[in-house]
Image (cartoon, rainbow, N blue to C red):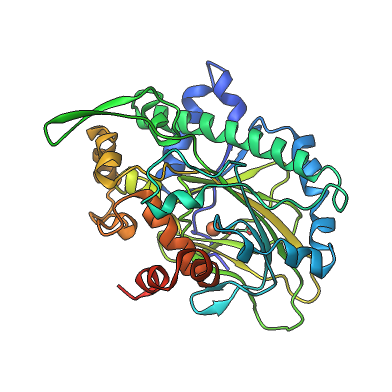
Amino acid sequence: MPTPTAPSIPLLDLSWASSPSQRPTLLKQLHAALFDVGFLYIKNHGVPQTTIDNLTNLLPSLFDLPKEKRAALSKTHSPHFVGYNGFAEEITLGKQDLREQFDFATELPVTHDRDFTKLYWRLRGPNQWPSELDLPGFRKAFTEYHDAVQELSYNFVHLIEEAFGIPIGTFDHFFGRAAPVTTQANGSSESRTFLPPQHRIKLLKYPPSELNAVGQGVGAHKDSSGWLTFLYQVSNEPGLEVLSADDEWIPATPIDGTFVVNFGNPFEAATEGAVKATTHRVIAPGPASNTRYSIPFFQGVPLDMTVSEIRSYIPEHVRRLRKEAGGEQTVSSFLDPRWDSLGESQLRKWVRSHPDVGLKFYGKEVVDYYTATH
Ligand SMILES: O=C(O)CCC(=O)C(=O)O
Ligand SMILES: [Fe+2]
């Protein structure tokens, strides 16, 4: 339980962005939220409740599909790491996560027009959809949800830029939304464009546990699948907890109509540690609880962006914010120069969490390389 002095997670009203008198206060709150807890709730975010309900209403039927239909959508059929994972098939901190999940992503064709010697391009590709007959309306509901949260995510990053005091659009390169830039590499100039991102969306089910012991819904972790995470907690079941700067677990209790926002390792690295990727976990529902559903949206990263390119988009002003915030000088090891691009660090992440999929589509050498303890 938090002590009375534990910081609480701020709730920001995004409708204030369109009120000239309230906007400065919102930006101030956002600035504080970015640096204090590193987690926040947002309300009046612009994603219509019907869009959310249309997807969340289908979740029980999705997870109730017959076992063989779920197995037919197994992640082991997809080199893009999309699809179904059965209960407790994922491991965090050496322990099974007591949840079941479907991974989806922005629907994309297989990438053929880029340098295929880079294995990570294989991460991009189509979803495994349940059939329209089995789950009518699912693909449409999912796509509308994806598009609406994508829009919210781009608008939200613009607010962050404003709160940082840097030009709006500075981070647009990270989403393939900016005009080509000319970089000076090795004396020659090169024009760079980035593909539109592949966002990742997990549909998660945490059933009530049968045991009275405290169960690990998902173990303590930082997100690494995207710049920012927009999490929708579907039902009123508690369980999500956030680690404060004082190493206290703070409950992030569901609040109707809100998303929880947090920051991934790539964003921590991009801002040179100005914004932290905060550790969080989910305690599995106890035997007397209801099933908990949740939907994290991970805002996609450009796979071919290298560490030095990311740095080149960060104004000095942002680096100074880290110092002003009194942050320690070390930055996430996520962008270790050994994983030269975001694509490589993404591939490494996926192979490490699903070595069976890695083995099938990328081969033993790749799996051994990425799973070796470095
Ligand atoms: O289910 C939740 O509330 C959080 C899930 C989560 O943190 C994750 O999948 O990265
Ligand atoms: Fe997470």
| Residue 105 in view in this figure | yes
Q: Nearer the viewer, residue 1 or 232?
A: 232
Q: Image point 22% across, 34% down: which residue?
A: 316
Task: Name the outermost residue toward the top.
Answer: 20
**Observer-nearest residue: 139 or 325?**
139
Residue 77 x %, y %: 63, 62
Q: Position of residue 65 (x, y in %)?
A: 84, 62
For the question of whether residue 276 can be seen, the reply is no
Rendered view: 279 above or below 109 = below
Query: Which part of the image, by quadrant, shows the C terminus?
Result: bottom left
Vertical comparison of 288 with 137: above or below: below
Against 65, residue 40 (above or below) is above
Q: Which residue corresponds to the image point at 48% horizontal and 75% vertical from the top-left?
A: 93
The N terminus lies in quadrant: bottom right
Q: Residue furthest left?
A: 187
Residue 69 screen position, x and y as percent: 80, 63
Taking the image in four quarters, ligand 1 sits in the one at: bottom right
Q: Residue at x 67, y 69 (%)?
A: 99
Residue 258 locus on image (x, y percent)? 66, 42
* In this picture, residue 21 sits left or right of residue 302: right
User: On the rendered structure, is 205 left or right of 5?
Assistant: right
Height in image: 213 above or below 332?
A: below
Task: Identify which residue, 304 or 322, lies in the foreground.
Answer: 304
Q: Nearer the viewer, residue 240 or 293?
A: 293
